[in-house]
Amino acid sequence: MKSEDFKKDLEKEIEKLNIILDSGNFNLKLVKEKMEEIYKEIIGMNDFLIVMDEKIKSLAKKIKNKKEGKKGFENFVKTMHISKVDLTTYIDRGWNFLMEEQYDDAIKVLEKASSLVPDDVKTLDLLGWAYINKERYDDAMIIFQKVIQIDPENSIAKNNLGFVCFKKGIYGEAIEHLTYVLKNSKDKVALMYANFYLGLIYKEREMYDDAIKFFKNTIEIGPNHVEAYYNLGLVYFLTGREKKGITTLKELIKKNRFNKWAQKAELKLKEITGEEYEKEN
């Protein structure tokens, strides 16, 4: 069975798009084309599952008169049932609501999907992230703990659980989860976010040298991680390294003049220098 390969490939493609969109530096037409391509694959797979569901039921009917009897047959069909809703619901609608920052709608859709497919890791990951964006950290924690019970090596859940612990002020546990990812994961996206979240934690705790190290690691793995640039610039200011702070924020602005982190950087530069910073075209 290659379904797990398909799921992993799909998750990687979606994560790549997330990174591109988070960077703020992308070709909108190409991104839309890629999203349409992924969506067609999802619909195609869902249609395939529906057809296979009917074929499996047809096979089951051929053993109806065997020694199992009617009750055994009905139980068999029930165990072989394949949900027709999960892919199109939680990936299409839920993901799109998340992208549009319509978190209440995303939660409704993803909670429904989770009730239909309780142990689907991707659905749970998306639902947990929706909870995070609504600052429902206790609910998010429960979700990511469940994911780790299902898949103890899930680096996305480990990262997200680390972030939730950080937001709840449980720094020791947050560092433990994120450090686990750094030591055990080979996925660049997972490593990038583990470094970034650790940077946020050490910045919060005023351990600025460690924060700088982790933000630099983040940028090395993901050069377009603009939020890491912004926080690195702030830490430089907090440690009295004003020139480095100004240089870092200017680099961020040059990456994409319309990104919200570039706009925040511009405001920060104006606050520090007392002058308007004109973005380069």
Image (cartoon, rainbow, N blue to C red):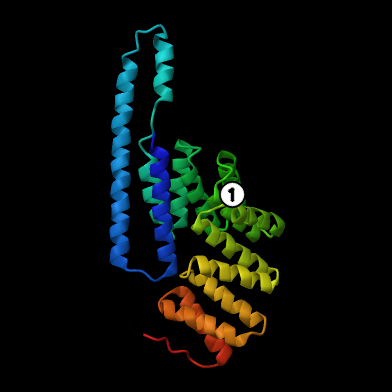
Measuring 33% from the left and 24% from the top, which residue is drawn there? 56
State the residue in front, 47 or 214: 214
Quadrant of residue 169 within the rendered picture: bottom right
Residue linked to disc 1: 139
State the residue in front, 215 or 45: 215
Above or below for 207 versus 114: below
Q: Is residue 2 visible?
A: yes
Above or below for 208 versus 152: below
Measuring 45% from the left and 42% from the top, which residue is drawn there? 112
Above or below for 70 versus 263: above
Q: Is residue 134 visible?
A: no
Q: Quadrant of the C terminus?
A: bottom left
Measuring 30% from the left and 20% from the top, which residue is drawn there? 58
Q: Position of residue 144 (x, y in %)?
A: 57, 47
State the residue in front, 161 or 84: 161
Element class at badge 1: helix
Amino acid type indicated by mark 1: Asp
In the rendered structure, the answer to whether residue 230 lies left or right of residue 64 reads right
Q: Quadrant of the N terminus?
A: top left
In the rendered structure, the answer to whether residue 34 lies left or right of residue 250 reads left
In the rendered structure, the answer to whether residue 230 lies left or right of residue 165 reads left
Q: Position of residue 164 (x, y in %)?
A: 61, 56
Q: Position of residue 218 (x, y in %)?
A: 54, 67
Quadrant of residue 21 within the rendered picture: bottom left
Q: Position of residue 129 (x, y in %)?
A: 51, 54
Alpha-carbon neighbours of circle 1 within 10 Å: few (<14), some, or many (≥20)? some
Q: Residue furthest top?
A: 67
Q: What count of labels does the image hold?
A: 1
